[in-house]
Structures are given as structure tokens and as C-alpha cells.
Image: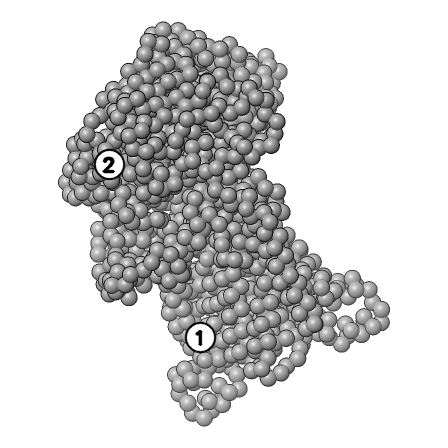
């Protein structure tokens, strides 16, 4: 689960690259990004899902909370009814769920839950991780040792199991899910940040500006952060994919979003019993998760290819 | 994730430095394990809900809770509980489960083999499919095959495991239910089927206690291994059939990751000078890949494989839940929900130790195989 | 750098060593065995008259001696139990002396935690035969019969005193998901499965190879409103909610067929359950008027809390919580946030009235008596402050042996519930099991597990799938249905429940009360043997009971040591060590 391990490989910025952080690098990267199909495909999927999230009330024919109890032909777990395919009743593209709600509307609105959840989780994790990594790398010594050993402790657990334990402690719900996943992913970012700081610390001009008496904070902000940004962005993009998957897993175990929130993992969890009798209830929310995660994974891959000069083709 | 990312100076001859390096890595691992221990201890004690109500049930009275806490040492002060716990762990004693009144180590002997067998077969499948897929994609770089293989791999890492598991179950139990392709979707063996323990087949007598009998029991709880070494072929086939779907579900993500890693690593190596030299000397493409490039390209793949072991343990919780397997994943999940502290503590420590050891082996082997990774 | 590393390693080792030593002095106290009740160790000053009553218990009397257990007086300050003593008066006679009349005595006695095992076996296992129970039942657990994690194989007991089962082996298995259980049934792997999900009824009914078996266990799903929190401290608000919820709509949509709207807290198949006025009709206008009168014309904000646990009384908690929120909003303008709470914490909070807002809970009967519904809920703090009149009425009812005499008492009690609305009863949930059509004699009894001994799969093995693995097979000390259902195939008590839920003699020929219903004399069936071949004696019956109810008994060990049903159904344990602070 979580972030594919190969995301790390080759993202460590080499000193050569770190020296040239001019705008041209980004332009080149942009060109490289758009030359590769994988990044474009990822960008397309992600944009599509963001669009769905933004336009959810327009796209969805009904409210995600509105139930159709008592209306003709509206039975629980009804299969999809598409007018274009000859179904004469009220149209429900993905069928009805266990509370007799329109599943299509719920899946569409689910994008409004999962995407922000992914973004927020990763933002929290990057922010915290970067601070920890920067402090550890910059100060070094025993502070570095303690901080990184703490990170090792967090990595000593399978991330899902630690997340489960944290959610049990905090109680179920979207916010706590988000926190739990953020906590278990912090070390990845901390390590990348620390490696960045360490490598740049040795570079002459940083040593020089230090010798010239530049404040540590200033060095950190002007020199280190921009260079660490590349791997963090790549890792973060893949991290969003991981966070969405892990939130779905927690939802599946009944620990994530609370009803009636239209969260994809929770929708799957609620209808597990119906997998053999009403498979559409499993199929559509699952596909939504897959497409979103696929989008972020491909976008992350594309970004890495574009930003990492080690992979020159 | 990879500790390989850490960089440092002092390049020396790897042979002599290796032992010292391993030793230091073990010493670093110790405080990490101690930290894991402490975190688990704190986490389980700040879980909401008392073990008493979780375990004695809804009808528990205040008096019986009091007796229960007393009997299980839950009335002691936290430092005292921690001391007892740490002391026991150091001596390899994980205590007794509160809920089952049985030694945690015994439960581990019953549960761990299931997870081990599942993870091992999933990893094997992931490697056997992932590596060739990656090689194929790299050799046919920028062709339909490459794009196809990588799309499959990308879709593979993007699927929720439990969802894939349920879809597989639906496919093989319902859609293909009445065909020869139908596969069992829950449990480890059909009802009432109990293969003989291998030591019985071998005609050995085992005592009730001791390491040997525990180890033997552990091995015989791996149904496939037990059937294999005692030549119970039909039982072995049944055991394999029960494991196919969970294995596929669990293997998908590592398979995709391994395929992607193999591909990018091989592409990288194929552009190196020595490969060009080999090509220039007239070696056939097949020979170049097999003899010159692949071995080097597999180095990072080995690392990734090692790192996947950890992910497998997390995935096992979901896979075991979907396919009704009594492994450590489901046991741990149940223990967390019933506040069975000794099981949570014991299992997590074992998992964390496995993690640390695997990381260590990966680091060391990587450093050993690739001198460019400098050791400090 | 390297020097620092060495220091760190040294520190780590020191820390571990320190931790190891720190534990040294204290291990003794916590690992001490659970069987020793330390009455003498408690240094607190106990006044002489409240000293724990002494007993004449022996763990297991030498053969020939007759066992007994009891307290000196029911009036002892720290004894809250309802049993004074249990004595074997001869080889086949057991006398139960109660502290007061108990109309539910036989109904409780038939419950499987009170089953009989040989005194010698309890002794031999140190009071914890967790996976090797020995009973008198039609099936027995052989060595290695329980393969942990996968299944329990039970073998037919050839010397069973009753009709021997028609098949050799009974296999217990488990799968958490209803869908998995159905698959096992459809594939022929299972003969019988429990707890169908509502959506699976059609699957079973539509398949000629399968049969649907209705489970008549009495239960109730209710919506609790503790009067300790605003605005539910106002009876008008609670009455408004009671009228403002369309319960029929909930039952129609979220309960399997056969479920009923609950017009009383107690189901009507329990004697005296449905006396008095039925519940309010659904009337949103009247409800809104009440709400306005209480000062909330536009409703208010509250929470709906529940635990995500499948129970027959509430098969789909999440869906029903959502539906309830919808109805509160639409019918009353009350905005409710749905909140799932971890099961243990939820029970802890609701059982003492500490859960704000509306909570979803229910009750499945332990034994068929109205006291098991009303007394368990409305004499304690679950819904906040109790209703004093109701508490008095229930105490009166609980000591009235004659059913007809008790009827008007329960009519008044139900009317009080309707007036004060500590909770609103919603549904009596129907449940169903399923079996292969070829399984003969398959029925679900209202109490306890199916009696597989009376069924015939037409082959030599019957495979049963339930929800989960038993925790242990020593049901003296278990409360989960999965453990109890396995025990019931192996162990027997003096009474059992028949297909209507009436207690009927099993190991007893009969149990007869004296005139005021405080002394019950039970005569045992002759010629019954345990699975180990030893004959059933009155001392076995007494010792089995003593192990559970007497906390000072050296064999009072069990699994968790809680012996919940002994404490809970008989008012409290004998010689319970005084609770500290």
C-alpha cells in the first residue's frame, strides 16, 4: 500500500542539478513532461476528477443524501437504470444504494470528499515532514539522530496497521482518517528533505554564504527549500494516490468517513454484503477510486521523469 | 523506505567495513525497536473503551470489571506495566492473551504461518510475473507492448486491494461458479479436511513442549509446505486452490511496482557504456540483456522487493479480511478492536522486528552488491 | 560521527537493561494466578458485621461426599445475589434455595452457561477447560478437534442418553461475511448457515436447493434518549420524537421480512410483554406541536450515535442511523449528525446514561421472561434518572410468580414507559438462517443454538457456518453467541428451551418449587454419563454451579474470570472480593 517504493529511487537531487535552479530548468522540465504520454494521461485523469469535484452539483442529477423511499420502482440496491439502454423507469445511471439513494450522484460527490482528503493529508505530511527533515539535516548531531530514529519508529510499523491503531485512538471520521494517514507518511518526506539539506550543506556556495554569516533560516528558505521541492512534489503527487487508497482501506474497515458522507471507501464497506447480489454497488465506487489513484500515480511518474535529469532519454 | 538514500563520506574497501557496518546497523535498530515497543504500549493504552467491556461483553458489571482488571494486571500503574512488558519482551515472553487466556506465542504459531504462506506466495508471484513483464517492456521500449505492460502495472498499483479481492471472488465464485475454473473464496481448507502433520507421516514423536515441537507445529500450519514435505498431493492441491485468489489480490501491487522498477532500471543500464561496448563487440541483443544488463539492472529491483515485504504485511490485513483467512492481519485487527493488549503488543513487536531485519538485509545486501553505495 | 553512534548504541542497551531490571520487583503481583481471591490480603478496616460470608465450599468433594455452595445469609451487606445455597442432598437430588421468589428461575437455569461438567474434570483442568469441555451432550470434542483459526470437529457421543444423532461428525466453521457463508452453502460445503443479510433472503428463497429458516429470537431495537442531557431532559421533546418518527417506514425498508414494528418494548411472544397501551401512532403534526410547546418550533441540533455492530435487532446500523437523521430533519426539523462510536466505548457510555443525544441500541433476550427486558433497562442509569414509580412496579412484578397476577403490573409499567419515553421502541427484528434443502429437521429455536443432533444431513457429516470463531468452549465464562452455540452441542444443563422457548427438563427429571417459590428441588435423570464415561451426579451439578458463582472457589478461574452470566443473572457472585475504591 501507500506510496510505491520506486517513487524514491532516483528522486534524490544530485548536486549538479541543485546548482542550477534557474527558470530554464523548469521550462525544460515542462517540455519533458509534455513529451511523455504517461504524464499527460495522468494530468488528464486528475483534471477530470477535479472537474467532477468542482462541478459535482451540476453533474449529479440528485443530492447525494436524497433518498427515493416510497417512490415507484425505487427499491434498495436496485441495479442501474439507463434510459438510453431502454430502461423505462426513473434514470439511475449506477443504480440505487442501501438507503435508496442515487449511486451516481453519490459517486460524483465522492470526488469532493476524496480529493480534498488526499490533498490535505499530503499537505500536512509534507509540511510537517519537511520541517522535521530540515531541522534534522541542518542541525545534525544528536537532534538529527533523535528525530530520524523517531521517524524510523514510525516506519517500523506497516503503515496501514499504524493508521488503524491511530484511528482507533482518535475515533472514526474523515478528519481523524486524514490525520492518521498524514502521521504515518511524514517520515518519507522528512527523509527526502533531510537528504536534500545534507547534500546542499556540503556545496561550496552554501558553505560560503554560511561563512559570510547568512542566517540559517535564510539559507534554508533561499537555497534548500527550492531544491527539495522537486522530490517533494513528485513524492507528494504519488502520496495523494497512496492517501486516497489508504483512506478507502480504512473506510472499508469501517473506520473512515461516517454516514451519510459519500466517501468511496465507505460506500464499498457498506455494500460488501451485496458483492454477489448487487455487484454494481461495489463496481462504481471502486472504479472511481481506481481512476483517481491511477491519475495521480501517472501524474507523479510523469513529473518524476520530467524533473529528474538522471533519467535522460 | 530505503535507508539507502542516506549519503555520507569515507569510501573504503567494502569487505572489511561490512561487518562493522552490519553491527552498527543492528545497534541502530535496537533503539528503534525499543521505540516501537513504547509507541505500541502507549497507543493501546490510550485507545478509547476499556478492555473489560470489550472482552467481558455488554453484560459486564462494575464488580466483574474490577476483578478482571486486577487479574490482568491492568490496575498497576503505567510505568509498572511498561516495566513488566519490557522485561517480558526482552526474554521473548509476550504474555497471555486477555481474551483467550492463551500464550500470545502460541497464537502466533497458529496465525503467522498463514500470513507467511500468503505473503511468500504473493511475493513469488509478484517477482515471477513482475520481472519478466518489466524486461519485456524495456526491450520493447516505446512500443505497444511497453505501453500496454506499463498501463497494466499502473492500474495494478491503483486498485484498492480489498476491492480487487471482492471482484476476484465475484468472478471466480459466481460468474465462473459452475465451471471448472471456480475457486474457493474463503478459508484455508474445505470443512473437515485435516491433512496429517508431516511429523506423523514421517513417524516422528514430538514432545508437547520445547522449541522443536513449536517449530514443527509452525511448519505444519503452513498447509502447502506441510502437504509438500509429507507427500500428501491431493491435500496440497486443495491448499493451493484456496490460496490462489488471495495470492493474486495481494500480489498485484508489488507485481506492478516490481515491473515498473525492472523496466526503468533496465532502460537505465542499457544506456551505460559497458553495454554499448558489448553491443559494439557484436553481442546479440538477447545476450546483451541477459549477460550484461540484467544482472546490474536487478540490483535496485532487489531493494524494492525487500521493501515490498513490509507492504505485504499491511495488505495482508485486508486480504485476510476479504478471504476469511486466520492470519496475523485479522488477528491483529480483532485484537485492536477488543483491546487485547498482549496480542497487539506481541504481534506488533514481531512485525516491527521483521521489518527492521528485512530493512537491514536489504541495506546490507545492496551495499554489498553495489560498491557505489558508500557505507558510513 | 562514529563515536556518537557508539554512544547511542550503549544508551540503547542501557535503556533496555534498565527496563528489564525495573520490571523485576513487580512481576510477582500481576502474574499471580487469578484463582486466589485475596480476601485476607486486603488491609482495609472491615467492620465485623460486613465480613464476607463464609462458605462451606469444597472445590470438588471426594467421591461419596455431597457438594454444596452458599452464603450464610442473603442479607449480608456485600452480597447482592439471589441464590442463598445450592446443595446436593443425595446422588440425584439438588436443592436450590433462593433469597426470594424468582418467577424466571427455570428460564434462567436452562441457559447454557449453567451447564454441567464433571467435577473431576473441572478439577483436572484447574477450573479452565477452555478447549476440552466434557459434557453429557450428543456431541463430544475429541483431542485436537478444535483447529484454531479454521474449524471445530465434534464427534457423535455413542453413549448419549437420548436419541443419538443420525450422523457421525458435526463441523463448526465461521465466516464473518454473510456472502461468504452463502457461497459455502451454495457450493455444498455447508449444510447450515446463520444470520443471513436482509438482501440475501431472495437468493435463498429463489434457490430450490436451499431452505430459509426463520429465527424467532425475541428482541427489540430502540432509540434511547437519556434525560441527563438537554433538550432531552424535557419529556415533551422525548414525546415529540416518539410521535415524529415513521417506524413503519424504517421496518419496511431496513429490516428483513417478518420483522415487526415494536408497539411495546418487550416482544409480544414473551408473557406479559404487551400489556397496556400500544406505542404512539406516527403523527408529525402533533409531534411538531409538542416540540413547539417545549420551545423548539424550529427543531434543534443533536447527534445520533451508534456502534457499527451487526445484531438481529439492528442488522444495518449505518443505514438506519442515516434514515433516522433524514426523518428527524423532515418530520421535526431536528438536525442530527450521525456519529459512529467504537462498540466498547459506546456500551460504556450508554449504559450509564452518559451518551448525549439519541443512541441506537437494542436487546436480544437471554431468557424468555419479561424481567429480562424491563428490569435490565429501566431500573438502572441507562436513560439517566430512573422513573421511581416504574422501579417500584418492576420490583413488584419480579417477585410475582403467577403470570395473570403480574399482568396488570406490567400494563402499568408499559404505560409509564409510553408516558415518560426514556426510549422509543422501533422494531422487533426478524432473522433467518439457511440450510440445504436436503437437511432434514432443520429449525431455529427461539433461544440458543440450533439443535444439530435432531437434524439429518443425509450424510455422515453436518457442516455449520456461523459468524465467528468461539472464544473458548468453557461457556461458564463466555458471553458471545458463537461460543455458546458450540457449547450447546456438547454440554447440557438441568433444563433446556423447547421450540416455543418454554424451559423443559433436560438433565433433570423435574424441578419443583416449594409453596412460596424460594426453594427448588431438582431430581436428576438416571443413567446419564459424561463423555469421559463417568456418571452424572448431583455433586457434579453443584460443583459446576459453584465454580461459576462462588468467587472464592479455587476453580473459579475460567477464561477471563468474569463469569458474566453468573454475576448478571443471579444478581452477583458469592464471596466476591471487595472492590477497591
Q: Is residue B228 left or right of residue B88?
A: left
How many numbered marks have been drawn onto this rendered protein structure?
2
| Quadrant of image for the C terminus of chain C | top right
The picture places residue B14, in percent across and down from the top left corner, at 57, 81
**Residue identified by numbered label 1:** B138
Q: From the image, state whether disc 1 or disc 2 is nearer to you.
A: 2
- Extreme-right residue of the structure: A213
Q: Measured along the vertical axis of the image, is residue A234 above or below residue A69? A: below
The picture places residue A8, in percent across and down from the top left corner, at 56, 66
Depth order, front residue of B320/C408: C408
Residue depicted at 47% across the width and 64% down the height: B308
Q: Is residue C203 visible?
A: no
**Residue identified by numbered label 2:** C534
Q: Measured along the vertical axis of the image, is residue A38 above or below residue A164? A: below
- Secondary structure at badge 2 equals loop
**CA gap, disc 1 and disc 2:** 75 Å
The picture places residue C500, in percent across and down from the top left corner, at 26, 22
* Quarter assignment of residue A135: bottom right
Amino acid at each position: 500500500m501507500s506510496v510505491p517504493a520506486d517513487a524514491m529511487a532516483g528522486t534524490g537531487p544530485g548536486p549538479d542539478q541543485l546548482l542550477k535552479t534557474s527558470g530554464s530548468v523548469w521550462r525544460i522540465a515542462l517540455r519533458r513532461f509534455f513529451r511523455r504520454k504517461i504524464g499527460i494521461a495522468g494530468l488528464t485523469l486528475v483534471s477530470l476528477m477535479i472537474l467532477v469535484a468542482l462541478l459535482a452539483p451540476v453533474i449529479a442529477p440528485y443530492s447525494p443524501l436524497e433518498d427515493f423511499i416510497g417512490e415507484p420502482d425505487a427499491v434498495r440496491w436496485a441495479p442501474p437504470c439507463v434510459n438510453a439502454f431502454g430502461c423505462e423507469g426513473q434514470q439511475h445511471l449506477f443504480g440505487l444504494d442501501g438507503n435508496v439513494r442515487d449511486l451516481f450522484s453519490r459517486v460524483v460527490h465522492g470526488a469532493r470528499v476524496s480529493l480534498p482528503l488526499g490533498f490535505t493529508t499530503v499537505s500536512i505530511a509534507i509540511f510537517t515532514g519537511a520541517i522535521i527533515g530540515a531541522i534534522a539535516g541542518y542541525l545534525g548531531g544528536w537532534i538529527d539522530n533523535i528525530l530520524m530514529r523517531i521517524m524510523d519508529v514510525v516506519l517500523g510499523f506497516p503503515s496501514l496497521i499504524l493508521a488503524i491503531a491511530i484511528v482507533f485512538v482518535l475515533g472514526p471520521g474523515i478528519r481523524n482518517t486524514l490525520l492518521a494517514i498524514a502521521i504515518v507518511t511524514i517520515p518519507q518526506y522528512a527523509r527526502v528533505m533531510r537528504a536534500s539539506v545534507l547534500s546542499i550543506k556540503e556545496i561550496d556556495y552554501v558553505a560560503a554564504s554560511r561563512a559570510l554569516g547568512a542566517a540559517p533560516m535564510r539559507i534554508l528558505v533561499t537555497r534548500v527549500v527550492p531544491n527539495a521541492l522537486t522530490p517533494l512534489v513528485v513524492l507528494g503527487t504519488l502520496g495523494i494516490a497512496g492517501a486516497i487508497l489508504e483512506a478507502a482501506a480504512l473506510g472499508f474497515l469501517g473506520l473512515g468517513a461516517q454516514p451519510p458522507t459519500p466517501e468511496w471507501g465507505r460506500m464499498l464497506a457498506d455494500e460488501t454484503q451485496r458483492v454477489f447480489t448487487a455487484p454494481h454497488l461495489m463496481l462504481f465506487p471502486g472504479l472511481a477510486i481506481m481512476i483517481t489513484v491511477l491519475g495521480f500515480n501517472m501524474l507523479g511518474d510523469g513529473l518524476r521523469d520530467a524533473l529528474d535529469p538522471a533519467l535522460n532519454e | 523506505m530505503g535507508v539507502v538514500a542516506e549519503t555520507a563520506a569515507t569510501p573504503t574497501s567494502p569487505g572489511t567495513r561490512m561487518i562493522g557496518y552490519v553491527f552498527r546497523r543492528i545497534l541502530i535498530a535496537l533503539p528503534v525497536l525499543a521505540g516501537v515497543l513504547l509507541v505500541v504500549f502507549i497507543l493501546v493504552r490510550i485507545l478509547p473503551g476499556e478492555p473489560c467491556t470489550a472482552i467481558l461483553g455488554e453484560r459486564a458489571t462494575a464488580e466483574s470489571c474490577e476483578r478482571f482488571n486486577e487479574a490482568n494486571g491492568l490496575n498497576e500503574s503505567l510505568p509498572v506495566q511498561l516495566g513488566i512488558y519490557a522485561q517480558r519482551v526482552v526474554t521473548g515472553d509476550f504474555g497471555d492473551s486477555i481474551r483467550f487466556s492463551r500464550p500470545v506465542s502460541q497464537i502466533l504459531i497458529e496465525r503467522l504461518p498463514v500470513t507467511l504462506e500468503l505473503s511468500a506466495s504473493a511475493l513469488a508471484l509478484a517477482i515471477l510475473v513482475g520481472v519478466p513483464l518489466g524486461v519485456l517492456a524495456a526491450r520493447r521500449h516505446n512500443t505497444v507492448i511497453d505501453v500496454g505492460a506499463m498501463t497494466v502495472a499502473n492500474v495494478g498499483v491503483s486498485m484498492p486491494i480489498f476491492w480487487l479481492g471482492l471482484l476476484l471472488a465475484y468472478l471466480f465464485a459466481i460468474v465462473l461458479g459452475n465451471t471448472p475454473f471456480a475457486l474457493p473464496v474463503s478459508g484455508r481448507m474445505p470443512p473437515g479436511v485435516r491433512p496429517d502433520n508431516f511429523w506423523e507421516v514421517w513417524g516422528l514423536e514430538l514432545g508437547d513442549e520445547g522449541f522443536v515441537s513449536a517449530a514443527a507445529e509452525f511448519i505444519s500450519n503452513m498447509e502447502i509446505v506441510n502437504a509438500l514435505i509429507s507427500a500428501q498431493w491431493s491435500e496440497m492441491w486443495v491448499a493451493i486452490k484456496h490460496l490462489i485468489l488471495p495470492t493474486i489480490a495481494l500480489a498485484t501491487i508489488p507485481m506492478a511496482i516490481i515491473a515498473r522498477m525492472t523496466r526503468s532500471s533496465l532502460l537505465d543500464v542499457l544506456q551505460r557504456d559497458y553495454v554499448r561496448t558489448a553491443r559494439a563487440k557484436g553481442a546479440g541483443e538477447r545476450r546483451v540483456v541477459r549477460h550484461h544488463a540484467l544482472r546490474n539492472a536487478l540490483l535496485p529491483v532487489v531493494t524494492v522487493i525487500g521493501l515490498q515485504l513490509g507492504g505485504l504485511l499491511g495488505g495482508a490485513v485486508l486480504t485476510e479480511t476479504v478471504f476469511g483467512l486466520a492470519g496475523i492481519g485479522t488477528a491483529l485487527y480483532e485484537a485492536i478492536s477488543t483491546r487485547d493488549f498482549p496480542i497487539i503488543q506481541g504481534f506488533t513487536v514481531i512485525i516491527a522486528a521483521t521489518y527492521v531485519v528485512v530493512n537491514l538485509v536489504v541495506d546490507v545486501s545492496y551495499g554489498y552488491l553495489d560498491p557505489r553505495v558508500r557505507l558510513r | 560521527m562514529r563515536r556518537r553512534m557508539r554512544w547511542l548504541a550503549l544508551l540503547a542497551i542501557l535503556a533496555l537493561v534498565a527496563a528489564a531490571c525495573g520490571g523485576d520487583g513487580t512481576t510477582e503481583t500481576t502474574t499471580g494466578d487469578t484463582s486466589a481471591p485475596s480476601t485476607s490480603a486486603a488491609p482495609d478496616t472491615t467492620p465485623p458485621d460486613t465480613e464476607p460470608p463464609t462458605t462451606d465450599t469444597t472445590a470438588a468433594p471426594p467421591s461419596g461426599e455431597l457438594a454444596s455452595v452458599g452464603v450464610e445469609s442473603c442479607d449480608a451487606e456485600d452480597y447482592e445475589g439471589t441464590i442463598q445455597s445450592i446443595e446436593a442432598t443425595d446422588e440425584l437430588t439438588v436443592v436450590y434455595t433462593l433469597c426470594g421468589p424468582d418467577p424466571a428461575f427455570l428460564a434462567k437455569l436452562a441457559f447454557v452457561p449453567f451447564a454441567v461438567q464433571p467435577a473431576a474434570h473441572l478439577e483436572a483442568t484447574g477450573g479452565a477447560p477452555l478447549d476440552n469441555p466434557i459434557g453429557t451432550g450428543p456431541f463430544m470434542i475429541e483431542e485436537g478437534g478444535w483447529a484454531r483459526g479454521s474449524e471445530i470437529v465434534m464427534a457423535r457421543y455413542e453413549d448419549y442418553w437420548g436419541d443419538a444423532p443420525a450422523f457421525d461428525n458435526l463441523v463448526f466453521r465461521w465466516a464473518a461475511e454473510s456472502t461468504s457463508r452463502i457461497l459455502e452453502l451454495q457450493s455444498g460445503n455447508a449444510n447450515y448457515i446463520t444470520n443471513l443479510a436482509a438482501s440475501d433472503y431472495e437468493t435463498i428463497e429463489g434457490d430450490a436447493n436451499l431452505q430459509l429458516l426463520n429465527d424467532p429470537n425475541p428482541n427489540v431495537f430502540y432509540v434511547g434518549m437519556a434525560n441527563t442531557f438537554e433538550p432531552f431532559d424535557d419529556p415533551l421533546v422525548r414525546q415529540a420524537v416518539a410521535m415524529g418518527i415513521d417506524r413503519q417506514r424504517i421496518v419496511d425498508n431496513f429490516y428483513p421480512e417478518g420483522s415487526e414494528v415494536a408497539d411495546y418494548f418487550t416482544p409480544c411472544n414473551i408473557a406479559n410483554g404487551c400489556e397496556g397501551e400500544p406505542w404512539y401512532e406516527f403523527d408529525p403534526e402533533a409531534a411538531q406541536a409538542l416540540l413547539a410547546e417545549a420551545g423548539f418550533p424550529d427543531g434543534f441540533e443533536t447527534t445520533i450515535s451508534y456502534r457499527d455492530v451487526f445484531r438481529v435487532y439492528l442488522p444495518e446500523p449505518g443505514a438506519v442511523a442515516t434514515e433516522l437523521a433524514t426523518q428527524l430533519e423532515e418530520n421535526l426539523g431536528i438536525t442530527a449528525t450521525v456519529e459512529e462510536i467504537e462498540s466498547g466505548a459506546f456500551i460504556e457510555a450508554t449504559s450509564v446514561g452518559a451518551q448525549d443525544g439519541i443512541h441506537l441500541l437494542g436487546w436480544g433476550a437471554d431468557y424468555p421472561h419479561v424481567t429480562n427486558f424491563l428490569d435490565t433497562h429501566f431500573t438502572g442509569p441507562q436513560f439517566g434518572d430512573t422513573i421511581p414509580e416504574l422501579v417500584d412496579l418492576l420490583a413488584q412484578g419480579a417477585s410475582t410468580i403467577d403470570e395473570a397476577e403480574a399482568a396488570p403490573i406490567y400494563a402499568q409499567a408499559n404505560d409509564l414507559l409510553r408516558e415518560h419515553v426514556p426510549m422509543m421502541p422501533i422494531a422487533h427484528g426478524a432473522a433467518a438462517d439457511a440450510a440445504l434443502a436436503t437437511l432434514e429437521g432443520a429449525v431455529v429455536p427461539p433461544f440458543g443454538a440450533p439443535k444439530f443432533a435432531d437434524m439429518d444431513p443425509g450424510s455422515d457429516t453436518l457442516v455449520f457456518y456461523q459468524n465467528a470463531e468461539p472464544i473458548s468452549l468453557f461457556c461458564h465464562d463466555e458471553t458471545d453467541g458463537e461460543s455458546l452455540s458450540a457449547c450447546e452441542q456438547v454440554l447440557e444443563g438441568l433444563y433446556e428451551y423447547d421450540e416455543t422457548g418454554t424451559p423443559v427438563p433436560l438433565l433433570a427429571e423435574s424441578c419443583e418449587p416449594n409453596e412460596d417459590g424460594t426453594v427448588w428441588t431438582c431430581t436428576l435423570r438416571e443413567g446419564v454419563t459424561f463423555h469421559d464415561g463417568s456418571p452424572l451426579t448431583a455433586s457434579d451439578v453443584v460443583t459446576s454451579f459453584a465454580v461459576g458463582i462462588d468467587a472464592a472457589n479455587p476453580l473459579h478461574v475460567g477464561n477471563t474470570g468474569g463469569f458474566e452470566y453468573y454475576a448478571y443473572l443471579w444478581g452477583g457472585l458469592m464471596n466476591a472480593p471487595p472492590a477497591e475504591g
